[in-house]
Image: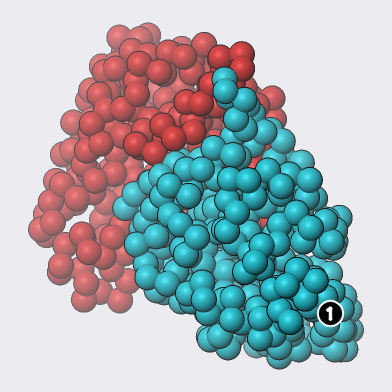
Chain colours: A cyan, B red
Amino acid sequence: MTREELIDQIKEKRTFLCVGLDTDLQKIPKHLLDCDDPVFEFNKVIIDATKDLCVAYKPNIAFYEMLGPKGWESLKKTIEYIPSNIFTIADAKRGDIGNTSGYYANTFFNTYDFDAVTIAPYMGSDSVTPFLAHTNKWAIVLAMTSNVGGLDFQFQKDQQGERLFEKVIKKSMEWGNDRNTMLVVGATRADLIDDVRKIAPDTFLLVPGVGAQGGSLEDVVHAGMNKDCGLLVNSSRGIIYASDQEDFGQVAREKALGLQKQMELHLANSGVIH
Amino acid sequence: MTREELIDQIKEKRTFLCVGLDTDLQKIPKHLLDCDDPVFEFNKVIIDATKDLCVAYKPNIAFYEMLGPKGWESLKKTIEYIPSNIFTIADAKRGDIGNTSGYYANTFFNTYDFDAVTIAPYMGSDSVTPFLAHTNKWAIVLAMTSNVGGLDFQFQKDQQGERLFEKVIKKSMEWGNDRNTMLVVGATRADLIDDVRKIAPDTFLLVPGVGAQGGSLEDVVHAGMNKDCGLLVNSSRGIIYASDQEDFGQVAREKALGLQKQMELHLANSGVIH
């Protein structure tokens, strides 16, 4: 998907919601466990209930990988089921050296036809650039994450006072550009999104951590929204596990609708839509 | 596998070779492509040919993942085929936050029964500690990698002059210990293994990059070997693709034997074996 197509979807649907498909057999409604493929059945209901309220779906690959080959079958069916005008993100946090990173890119862009993959930058350019060789596909680089461990290294200052996450952002923007690269920026540190925007004013940010993890949508929008929106805000648990009963699709829809309505207001207030 | 068991294997087999099972349909002998599972058939021959000459096997997961669910079947068969007294490393370079990292640990330690997983440290403690909760299993943290992109961030100095890879090593040794944590250290920077050993004198180092990637076994041993050996040196292409003909198993054995003989000398010279 191109940047223009993504922005068009945001304006048309009046939302920048990304729904995290972190589908866990321990947490989905019990009645689904009798199905042949409970993970896919669950995802299907969630997608049907939310596809007009979001612009992206983001399965975290750990949840599928843990189930062995069957989990990858569920993932493939899920990706094929998502309407093609919705942006798809493999939250895989992969990262390896050149040719091997190329294989990971191949996996998610060709074997599974995702639009984007999240990437860990520790090994530098070799980890990221192979993903940029695919037309209309995206690398989403981990920059500043919202977890406690994010403090261990990402905020380390170099001798010029530059923090590691700032260096990662600058390098990412040298390797790629705003049309093939996004950044993961945690919502629980919305005060720092200002700093990110100083380096990458136009880049799309994938922001997890709103809702269950404690981040505020308003703070994120205030610091991070630009003229093209420039944000994909993810919610997983707060939507998909809002009910563990047979009504889980309906309740997920209500939660997603609540977020879409807030997002529509923010888009209008910021002049992205009219 | 415990540290003692690993050291016993090294002394008994007089080798610290790790064979990288980076099995690529584009590179394996053509006659195998008619098999039902060419990847597993290839691995089986390589394992039969080298299992008395190495102490570890390391499949890079990218090669299997790219093949979709079938690749994961090949991986599972491969892991089950490896004799239980050989250390197995999932070179997956995973890393996520707490509960999700726990799922990755579950994948490789339970779904596939590996002894160890390589881990990307960018997200900090949350990415590593869930792997340490499994008894007799190992986290192998990327510290200083031998690829060009390793220079992008790993050598960044903080305001006290400490480089990022040194910080990663110190933190890793706070989270874990020499009985459940190893470090990835690239062989093409053998001069820096000295610096690693100052911080982590007893820790096992997984060293890729010897052979095809240009590192010297002698330099690595000189800088990195300790009284328990403390090294697993990986070779992939140099062994498994030494021939692309029907004799590939025999030729792989000759290459592995050449390395084992060199390693035996180094182990004897360093007093690890007599």
* Residue holding disc 1: A261
Q: Quadrant of residue B169?
A: top right
Residue B263 relative to residue B31: left or right: right
Give me the residue at 82% from left, 75% from top. Answer: A265
Name the secondary structure under disc 1. Answer: helix
Q: What x and y, as percent, mark residue B101?
A: 66, 51
Residue A118 relative to residue B76: left or right: right
Tell which subunit mark 1 falls on: A
Q: Quadrant of residue B257?
A: top left
**Would you call the spot at circle 1 few (<14 residues within 10 Å), some (14-19), or many (20 or more)?**
some
Position of the C terminus of chain A by quadrant: bottom right
Q: Quadrant of residue B244?
A: bottom left
Q: What x and y, as percent, mark residue A50?
A: 74, 85
Residue B60 relative to residue B163: left or right: left
Q: Is residue A133 above or below residue B180?
A: below
Residue A209 visible in the snapshot: no
Q: Nearer the viewer, residue B200 or B166?
A: B166
